[in-house]
Image (spheres, rainbow, N blue to C red):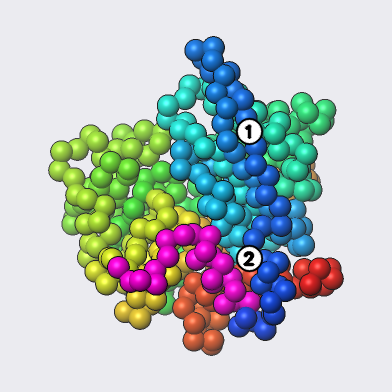
Amino acid sequence: MSGTESKDVLLSTQIVIEEALRKLGYGDEMVELLKEPIRLLTVRIPVRMDDGKTKVFHGFRAQHNDAVGPTKGGVRFHPDVTEAEVKALSIWMSLKCGIADLPYGGGKGGIICDPRKMSFRELERLSRGYVRAISQLVGPSKDIPAPDVMTNSQVMAWMMDEYSRIREFDSPGFITGKPIVLGGSQGRETATARGVAIMIDEAMRKKGIAIQDARVVIQGFGNAGSFLAKFMHEAGARVIGISDVNGALYNEKGLDIEYLLDRRDSFGTVTNLFRETISNDELLTLDCDVLVPAAIENQITSDNADRIKAKIIVEAANGPTTLEATRIVTERGILLVPDVLASSGGVIVSYFEWVQNNQGYYWSEAEVDEKLRRMMIRGFNQVYEQHQTRKVDMRLAAYMVGVRKIAEASRLRGWV
């Protein structure tokens, strides 16, 4: 492993943020302002468990910068949530909003817990307790949560209901990713995967690869990974490899995606049903046209970057490729579409949901998909143009496009 490689997602993010701001001509003060969230709330949430005992959970809410407008970002329930990760994720949300030109800064929340080991009622009490703990800092014009890792529309419904009780008025715009009947948007559940599919299309166009029969490998079979597999299969591509937390499946002729989607559980687990599996490392280094890391951070590193055989990497997960690995794959001529661009479909359709809540007027799924496609392609073209004209890798190009709006808003407000 390279001695310079860092797997600290916050530090890696700060390195690229600084480099992007320097290239855009900003000084030390702007770097100092934007390298950390402007606000971080740490909370303790007492929850009465089903056995009658009270367990205290630890949670966070980070708000990176609200110069452009309210902060926006998901809430994850995961045993490995850390303060540093939540901070980094809030910065990435700012960048996603900047690339998509949304009127938001980035926010992020997390609770250290394992929802797989909790009952439905325990999850409800935890969700409501989190909202009570952060209610002073959030709201439709302050900070708007959304689903993230291991949270879903049901969790959002509980959170909205709790917030409405506290504020004593119905407030659908407080949170996005809600069930349709409670003011959710058409297309929100599939938005991240839909956005990644659009980015795959654009990247393949640049590389001159046809979607028909293209070989796609997807690491992770949760919300984004499973819907993406479905979209790729429907578009005529061959999904030759998928993985979950237990292992990976591979078939050179293409996996039976419909069967796998039918058999996966609510946490995206399916490989435990099969005897013949391969390792995660083998999956990442399969010979393919498109590799989509859709699981967790630090999957493509200096250890395996020189063995990646894909022509295109599209990051559906947050931070799956280290900076050292980014450099290696870029030098090898692999087109890497970074997370802050590729996985921005979720926040774009969350924005659409917020707009619809504020207007009280709702759009069809076709309208949502068309608007999403237009915004994703515009973002891709801006980042690709920056990559070409400034001779920088796609990650730095995306950071330069993404950070500019929030830096300008901070400057014009007189903060820096």
What amino acid is at disc 2?
Lys
Q: Which image quarter holds the C terminus?
A: bottom right
Q: What amino acid type should be assigned to the residue bearing mark 1?
A: Arg
Q: Which residue is mark 1?
A: 44
First in sequence, mark 1 or 2: give its number. 2
Q: Answer with left or right where residue 57 lies relative to residue 3.
A: right
Q: From what the image shows, is residue 118 above or below residue 371?
A: above
Residue 41 vs residue 214, the one in the foreground: 41
Please check the rendered image and state whether residue 7 is part of the magenta-colored stretch, yes or no.
yes
- Residue visible at 47% across and 31% down? 115
* The N terminus lies in quadrant: bottom left
- Residue 8 pos. (x, y %): 46, 60
**Is residue 211 shown left or right of residue 198?**
left
Q: Which residues are drawn in magenta?
A: 1-21
Where does residue 128 sit, x and y in percent of width and height?
A: 65, 28
Residue at left offset 27%, top offset 72%: 306
Pointer 2 residue: 35
| Dominant secondary structure (helix, strand or loop) of the stretch shown in magenta | helix
Q: Position of residue 155 (x, y in %)?
A: 58, 32
